[in-house]
Amino acid sequence: MTSFSIQTFGCRVNQAEAFYWSNIFQNFGLKYEKDYFRSDIVVVNSCTLTSRADRDTRKFIRKVASLNPAARLIVTGCYVERAPEDLQKMPQVWYLFPNKGKKHLVDKVISLSDEKRDSPVLPFRSRALVKIQDGCDFKCTFCIIPSVRGRSVSYEKREILAQIKEFIKQGFKEVVLTGIHLCSYGSSLKPKSSLMLLLKEIEKIKGLSRVRLSSLDPRFLEPPLLEHITTSEKICPHFHLSLQSGSDVILERMGRKIKIKDYKEILTFLSKKSPQASLGADIIVGFPGETEDDFMQTYRFLKQSPLTYFHVFSYSPRPGTAAATWKQINGKVKKERAGLLRDLSVRKNVRFRQLFIGKECDAIVIKKEKARDEILTSNYLKVRVPSSPYCEREEARVKILKVDRGETTGQVISL
C-alpha cells in the first residue's frame, strides 16, 4: 500500500490544508505515515513569508532526499507560487503545484491508489483544522501573501458545516477555524455573510465542544463581534491578533491603517470581558525606518498591555513588496530588538500562567508520550501531565501545579 506523509511550514491555513488532504488521501486507500523518512510520497506545503521560511523548505527537501532516497516529493504552497525555479531542480522533487493548482495535487496523489477503503482515518492532528477563507484583499507594504494567495475567497457555509460534522463523527472535540484573513469571511459570498454569522451556525452543531479562532485582524474587530467571541460558551478564550507594531509611525509605513489607541481599546475590552483569556499578537521588528524610539514605543506598549504572549519576527524583505525597496535596518540591530521582545514575551507569559496555579481547567489531550501527556487548555495553556487514561482528541480536566519559564505541569482530574 502506498504511504504518504505531509510536512507543513508557516501558517494555520497550510496546516488546515494538510489536515484536509490527509483525510482525503486515506479515504482513497493511501496509508498515513508519520515518519517522513519511511514514506513513499512526501507532500511539502511551503511558506514564503520570510527568507527563513524559504530556507526551511529547502533544508527539509534535502534532508528527505538524503535519508529517504526512494521517496517522491510533491512541493506546493506559497514558495512554489512565488519562486518555482528555486525548487524545480532540487533532489527528488517529483511535482510542483502552486497554490492555484492544489486541487490537481489531490488528484495526483489519489491516482496512486486503486480503491477506496472503509478502515478508520488516522488523525493527522489532535484538533480538527478547518479552512474557511483564503487570500487577502489588502496591501500591507511588507507582505507577499496577497500576491501568492490571491484575493479573499470565502467558502460556502454548508461546506464548512459539513466538514465540521464529519470531523465530529471522527471523534474530534475541538475545531480550529483558519483563514489568511479570517475577519474577511463572507465578504466574497453572494449574499454576503460574516464571521459572526458563521460562528453562530457552527456553535449549534451537536457534539462540538469548542471552537478556536486563528489570527484576527484588529482593524475588523467590530464591537458586536468582540462581544460575541468573549461571551460564547463554545469559543475558546484565546485571541491572537495581527498587531505588527506598537508605533503609529511604523504602522502607517506598513499600510496598516490603525492607531495604537485602537489596539489599546480592543485589548482592554478583551481582557476585561474575558480575564482568563490568552491574548497573543504577531510583532515585526526592524521594519525599514524603525528608529530606536519607534522600537521603544513598541516595547513599552507590549509591556503595559494585557497581552500574554507574542510571536516576534525580524523583518525579512520580500521581493515584489514596497518595503523591500526601502533602506533596511542592520541585521544585528534587528536581532537585538527581537531578542528583547522575545524575553519580554516569556516573562509576561510566565506571569500569566502562574495565575492558574492550583486551578482546574478544561482541556483536550493533544499528545501522548510514554511517561506523560501534553494537554491544551481552552485558554491555550500547554500542560505536561503524567500519562493519563485519556486518548488524543479526548476531553480532560487538568489542575495546574507548577509553572516555570519553559513548562507548565499539572495533573489530570477525572471528568
Image (cartoon, rainbow, N blue to C red):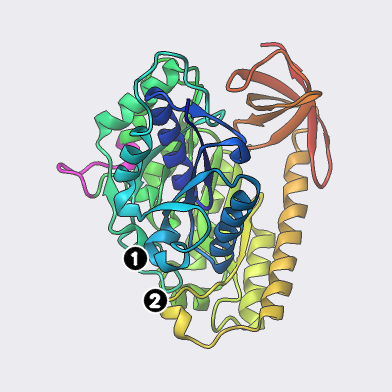
User: Which residue is found at the position 75% from the left and 33% from the top?
Assistant: 356
Q: Where does the image place residue 410, in percent across and percent down from the top left?
A: 79, 27
> At 34% across and 30% down in the image, what residue appears?
200
Residue 147's disc is 1
275 with respect to 252 (left or right): right
- Name, please, the residue furthest toward the left: 190
Decide: few, some or many residues near mark 2? Use Cα within 10 Å; few <14, some 14-19, many ≥20. Answer: some
> Which residue is denoted by mark 2 in the rendering?
320
Circle 1/circle 2 CB separation < 8 Å: yes
Give the secondary structure at mark 1: helix
In space, the residues marked 1 and 2 are separated at their CA atoms by 9 Å
Q: Is 52 displayed left or right of 409 in the figure? A: left
Which residue is rendered at x = 81% and y = 23% of the image?
A: 371
Query: Looking at the figure, which quarter contains the C terminus?
Result: top right
* Residue nearest the viewer, comparing 83 with 318: 83
Residue reaching furthest front?
Answer: 70
Give residue 268's position: percent from left, percent from top: 56, 51
Q: Which residues are magenta?
A: 188-197
Describe residue 200's horizontal placement relative to residue 271 as left or right.
Answer: left
Q: What's the amino acid at mark 2?
A: Gly
Say which mark, if any, is on residue 308.
none
Which secondary structure dominates the residues rendered in magenta? loop
- Which amino acid lies under the numbered mark 1 shown in the image of this protein? Ser
Residue 342 lies in quadrant: bottom right
Judge whether 319 appears above or below 343 on screen.
below
Mark 1, other Cα within 10 Å: few <14 / some 14–19 / many ≥20: some
